């Protein structure tokens, strides 16, 4: 394994997909991403349906995978 391969290797034996999943979980939990908005009073937005929440999380996971796999030279 040369130096370039070491730089691209995921930490602690995790695959890049596992790292992306951890990143997605962190972002979703810290920001409330894809969760329905609970508010008191009138709201201008409708709550997201479960299907919309799943789509949003899958989209976030895809973005995290792309970010983890991105070549540092790009």
Image (spheres, grey):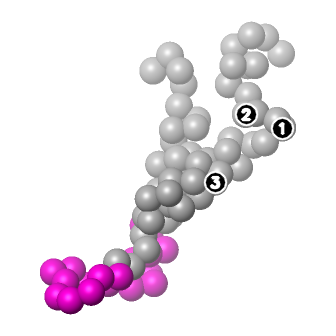
Q: CA distance from mark 1 to mark 3?
A: 14 Å
Using the image, tell me which numbered label, if any, was put on residue 21: 3
Q: Quadrant of residue 25?
A: bottom right
**Measured along the vertical axis of the image, is residue 41 above or below residue 68?**
below
Question: Circles 2 and 1: CB distance less than 8 Å?
Answer: yes
Question: Can see residue 48?
Answer: no
- Secondary structure type for disc 1: helix
Question: Can see residue 40?
Answer: yes
Residue plotted at (73% across, 33% down): 10
**Measured along the vertical axis of the image, is residue 27 above or below residue 58?**
above
Q: Residues within 10 Å of mark 1 (few under 14, many from 20)?
A: few
The magenta region covers: 38-56
Q: CA distance from mark 2 to mark 3?
A: 12 Å
Question: Circles 2 and 3: CB distance less than 8 Å?
Answer: no
Residue plotted at (15% across, 81% down): 44
Q: Residue 69 magenta-drawn?
A: no
Q: Residues within 10 Å of mark 3 (few under 14, many from 20)?
A: some
Residue plotted at (69% across, 14% down): 4
Residue plotted at (53% across, 31% down): 70
Q: Is residue 69 left or right of residue 34?
A: right
Quadrant assignment for the C terminus: top left
- Secondary structure type for disc 3: helix
Q: Nearer the viewer, residue 36 or 52?
A: 36
Of callouts 2 and 3, which one flags the residue occurring earlier in the amino acid sequence?
2
Q: CA distance from mark 2 to mark 1?
A: 7 Å
Using the image, tell me which numbered label, if any, was put on residue 13: 1
The residue singled out by tag 2 in the image is 10
Residue farthest toward the front in the current orientation of the protein: 40
Q: Quadrant of residue 69?
A: top right
Residue 3: image location, x then y, percent: 74, 10
Q: Residues within 10 Å of mark 2 (few under 14, many from 20)?
A: some
């Amino acid at each position: 394994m040369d130096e370039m391969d070491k730089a691209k290797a995921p930490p602690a034996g995790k695959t890049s997909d596992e790292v992306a999943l951890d990143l997605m979980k962190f972002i979703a939990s810290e920001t409330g991403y894809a969760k329905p908005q609970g508010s008191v009073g009138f709201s201008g937005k409708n709550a997201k349906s479960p299907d919309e929440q799943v789509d949003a999380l899958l989209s976030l996971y895809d973005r995290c995978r792309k970010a983890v796999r991105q070549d540092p030279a790009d």
